[in-house]
């Protein structure tokens, strides 16, 4: 059985073109956490959530090696971390100050 690699299978989602375009996002199942706080805080909620997410994902992935088989399991490459960020605080003149900076790699 071949591993599902989300970045290869869903290139429009993970390797978008330079120009804006509409894409259809298929139904998918995810594990996720919800929280608040500064994602840059050392030993903060965000860091703990990352450890939890990757720990769960790799536990599920490696379950194929054990005797208990998870119903509906398929082998996969652990996909890249995704996040939804927002700030509920409204600043001066209605601007929304954000706690993160996006950078080009």
Image (cartoon, rainbow, N blue to C red):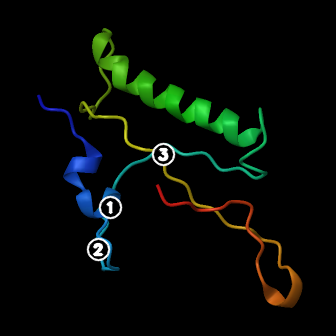
Q: Is residue 27 visible?
A: no
Vertical side of 17 occupied by 33: above or below: above
For mark 2, give the secondary structure: loop
Residue pictured at 81% horizontal, 88% vertical = 94
Quadrant of residue 65 within the rendered picture: top left
Residue pictured at 74% horizontal, 40% vertical = 45
Residue 23 location, x and y as percent?
29, 73
Query: Quick one: label 1, few (<14), some, or many (20+) residues within 10 Å?
Result: some
Left or right of 23, for residue 49: right
Residue pictured at 32% horizontal, 26% vertical = 70
Residue pictured at 24% horizontal, 56% vertical = 10
Residue 4 location, x and y as percent?
22, 39
Cβ–Cβ under 8 Å for marks 1 and 2 = yes
Quadrant of residue 74 within the rendered picture: top left
Circle on res. 23: 2
| Most distant residue in the right direction | 92
Separation of residues labelled 1 and 3 (CA atoms): 13 Å
Sequence-earlier tag: 1 or 2: 1
Q: Quadrant of the N terminus?
A: top left
Sequence-earlier tag: 3 or 2: 2
Left or right of 13, for residue 9: left
Residue 36 location, x and y as percent?
75, 52
Circle on res. 13: 1
Residue 31 location, x and y as percent?
49, 43
Q: Is residue 23 visible?
A: yes
Left or right of 57, for residue 87: right
Circle on res. 81: 3
For mark 3, give the secondary structure: loop
Query: Quick one: label 2, few (<14), some, or many (20+) residues within 10 Å?
Result: few
């Amino acid at each position: 059985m071949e591993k599902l690699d989300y970045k290869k299978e869903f290139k429009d989602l993970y390797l978008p073109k330079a120009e804006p375009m509409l894409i259809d996002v298929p139904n998918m199942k995810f594990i996720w956490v919800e929280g608040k706080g500064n994602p840059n805080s050392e030993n903060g909620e965000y860091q703990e959530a990352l450890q939890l997410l990757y720990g769960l994902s790799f536990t599920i992935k490696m379950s194929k090696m054990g005797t208990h088989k998870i119903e509906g399991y398929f082998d996969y490459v652990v996909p890249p971390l995704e996040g939804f960020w927002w700030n509920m605080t409204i600043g001066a003149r209605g601007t929304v100050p954000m706690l993160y900076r996006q950078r080009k790699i």
